Image (cartoon, rainbow, N blue to C red):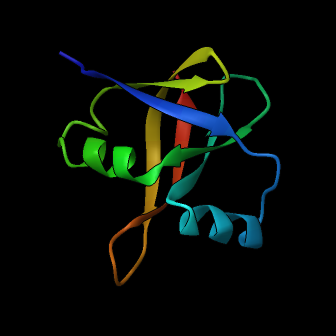
Amino acid sequence: MSNTLTLPAETRAKTGKGASRTLRREGRVPAVIYGGNAEPIAIHVEAKELIRQLNTGTFFDGVIELTVDGQTIKTTPKDVAFHPVSDRPEHVDFLRA
């Protein structure tokens, strides 16, 4: 039985190292949605909500419904990059389901 989690997200206009660092200082985690024969979407999610869902233990086992600009996109988490010292999530890759 797969679990379905919901995660609110927002699109981001700027990408790159500087923009990502700014997002992390504001308590957000940069992410990307790719796959499904569509263009990748650069997004960001709230760090506290992402950490809460990562700690459930079922984050990688189920479907994550991302709500981006009023549109729901079903995805599966592909990878989460963590900071080597603080173990905070730095980036998330989502694959369209």
Q: Is residue 6 above or below residue 44?
A: above
Coordinates of residue 43 in the picture (x, y in percent): 65, 42
Q: Is 76 left or right of 12, judged from the image as shown?
A: left
In which image quadrant can residue 95 be found? top right
Q: Image point 37% across, 67% down: which residue? A: 88
Q: Say which quadrant the N terminus sits in.
A: top left
Left or right, 22 with respect to 94, comes to right
Query: Toward the viewer: 78 or 44?
Result: 44
- Foreground: 7 or 59? 7
Total marks shown come to 0
What x and y, as percent, mark residue 14? Answer: 82, 54
Q: Residue at x 74, y 37 (%)?
A: 40
Instruction: Tell me residue 16's x, y (percent).
Output: 77, 65
Determine the image quadrant of residue 64: top left
In the rendered image, residue 49, in percent from the top left (x then y), is placed at 36, 44
Residue closest to the far front: 26
Q: In the orientation shown, which residue stands out farthest toward the bottom?
A: 85
Compared with 59, 51 (above or below) is: below
Q: Residue at x 76, y 25 (%)?
A: 38
Q: Residue at x 52, y 44 (%)?
A: 45
- Name above or below for residue 74 compared with residue 31: above
Q: Is residue 55 left or right of residue 89?
A: left
On the rendered structure, is 38 left or right of 66?
A: right
- The quadrant holding residue 57 is top left
